[in-house]
Amino acid sequence: MSKKSLLLSFVPIFLLFLFFPISVHAYQTGYVDTNGSLLVRDSANTESPVVGSLVDRQTIEYLDIGNGWGQITYHGRTGYVSLDYITETGVDASEEADAQDTVVQDEAETVPLNGAPLGSIQRIVLDPGHGGQDPGAVVHNFYEKEITLDIANRAAAYLTDAGYNVSLTRSNDSFVALDDRAEYANGTSADIFISIHANASFDLDANGIETYYAPGSAAGQTLANALQSEAVREIDMRDRGVLPSNYVVLRKTAMPAALIEFGFMTNGYDRSLQQTDLMRDQSARAILRAVQSL
């Protein structure tokens, strides 16, 4: 084929991309809508091995990959759930965008800004996970939304006494959407954002503390490392390490952000600690010391 013919063959393709938008998958948020638990599988089919489960009313972010399946991040790995049991609550960004615009939008949505240098922290947003109709994990009438709020309130008191300006994304048992949490934090011009959670797993032996940060955020990773280090120093739980993840509250906050999981509610040992004032106070002190160490 001549160079001229080769060039002409690309012209229709170029015009197609120029004048017609390309459909792009976008992250969506929703909650588990089932009377029991929703299985998380290793691949998008019902014969695939089960790698975990989600509880009823649990809020998640997912990609609709078609054929009734959604792709999620489950404890640092990729998992798949049936969308028959997910009720959509929101969509991130526009699903219809020009190819060139999509690249710019994806970068803006998935890589948080560095924000203020970590050495000049004054304003902090604490994010107690779940709340209201979203209980998070539920084990034997023990609700994740309750432990996260308790730890956040204790941490806020410690941080305030130490001279920091602290705000909470929720201060009571109310539902706040994931996007709204990030938007609230951005509106406060906070220097750092810390999301507080308790873990759960289909594997009842899974245990310990782990912390997440947004991929590409060096400052977020530094914050996550500090939180993880102080938490395992304070609390007698296994160190599961620090991992990158595209959680909404990490991806959409315009400051260094981290999400910490204070043990597994589905593990008998971890849960026995989580139900004590001592462990919750240790968790709050760990947050204070992590901030002070930066």
Image: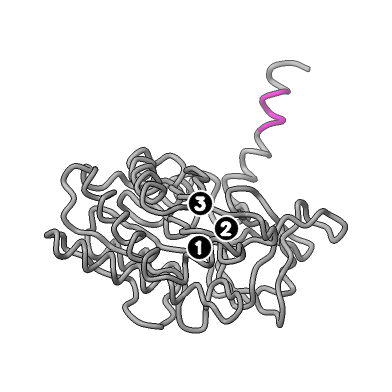
Determine whether the residue tagged by mark 1 lies in a helix, strand or loop: loop
Pointers 2 and 1 in contact (CB under 8 A)? yes
Please report the residue visible at 64 percent of the width from the left and 77 percent of the height from the top.
56
Q: Nearer the viewer, mark 2 or mark 3?
A: 3
What predominant SS class does the magenta segment belong to? helix
- Nearer to the camera, 178 or 192: 192
- Furthest residue in direction left, as rendered: 163
Q: Say whether residue 22 is left or right of residue 191.
A: right
Which tag, 2 or 1, sits closer to the chain's start? 2
Q: Where is residue 55 in the image (x, y as percent from the top left)?
A: 64, 72
Which tag, 2 or 3, sits closer to the chain's start? 2
Query: Residue flagged by tag 2: what amino acid is it?
Result: Ala
Determine whether the residue tagged by mark 2 lies in a helix, strand or loop: loop
- Nearer to the camera, 80 or 228: 228
What's the CA distance linking mark 2 and mark 3? Answer: 12 Å
Q: In this view, does 208 lie above or below 94?
A: above
Q: Position of residue 266 (x, y in %)?
A: 61, 65
Badge 2, how many Cα within 10 Å: few under 14, some, many 20+?
A: some
Way the structure is coloured: one colour
- Furthest residue in direction top, as rendered: 2
Residue 231 lies within the magenta run: no
Q: Position of residue 156 (x, y in %)?
A: 25, 67
Which tag, 3 or 1, sits closer to the chain's start? 1
- Nearer to the camera, 10 or 276: 276
Q: Which residue is denoted by mark 3 in the rendering?
A: 246
Determine whether the residue tagged by mark 3 lies in a helix, strand or loop: loop
Q: What stretch is highlighted in magenta?
A: 6-10
Q: Which residue is denoted by mark 1 in the rendering?
A: 92
Please report the residue visible at 46 percent of the width from the left and 63 percent of the height from the top.
197
Badge 1, how many Cα within 10 Å: few under 14, some, many 20+?
A: some
Query: Residue flagged by tag 1: what amino acid is it?
Result: Asp
